[in-house]
Image (cartoon, rainbow, N blue to C red):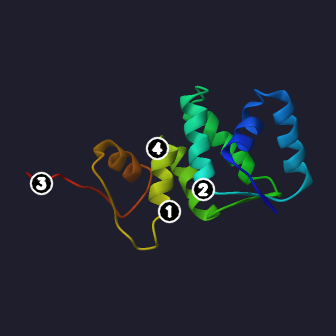
Amino acid sequence: MTAVDTNVLVRLLTEDEPKQAAAARFLFAARPIWIAKTVLLETNWVLSSLYGFDEDAIREAFTRLLGLNSVHIEDEPAVSAALALAAHGIEFAGALHLSSRPPGAAFVSFDRSFVRRAKRAGASGISEMSARD
């Protein structure tokens, strides 16, 4: 099994550097690949911030990756749950934070909008935290 860095995943998904993209495709076809959650978070940031990909395109790309038999994702249940929440309009990073908490743990955020969207998407155990004066 080979773990990949963010730049390998970005080359695979953007194909902006043809030689590196070809090498990434070959690697993904040749052996089992392991992708850390941190690599997914960083790839999400790179694709949205530097390449202008929208959240739907990134979610679809990550969903296709999870569907590849050769790809193994760290904490795949949490990543799958995050992608399901992202399909309801929640930013992937926040959805992954929420989905990665231990079973039964409450989740708090100062972000009122995030909490509302997460609850509408079916997330439980999430609440808004208010600042004390």
- The residue positioned farthest toward the left in the image shown: 133
Distance between mark 2 and mark 1 Cα atoms: 10 Å
Whichever of callouts 3 and 2 sits on the residue coming sooner in the sequence is 2
The residue carrying mark 3 is: 132
**Amino acid type of disc 4?**
Ile
Q: CA distance from mark 1 to mark 3?
A: 27 Å
Q: Secondary structure at mark 1?
A: loop
Q: Quickly name the residue at label 4.
A: 90
> Mark 2 belongs to which amino acid?
Lys
- Which amino acid type is shown beneath numbered disc 3? Arg
Query: N-terminal of the two: label 1 or label 4?
Result: 4
Residue at label 1? Answer: 100
Q: Name the residue at 83% across, 42% down.
A: 24
SS at circle 4: loop
Q: CA distance from mark 4 to mark 2?
A: 17 Å
How far apart are labels 1 and 4 at the CA level?
Answer: 15 Å
Residue 108 on image: x %, y %: 31, 58
The image position of residue 46, as x and y in percent, is 59, 35
Q: Give the crowd class for mark 4: few <14, some 14-19, many >=20 residues within 10 Å.
A: many
Residue carrying label 2: 37
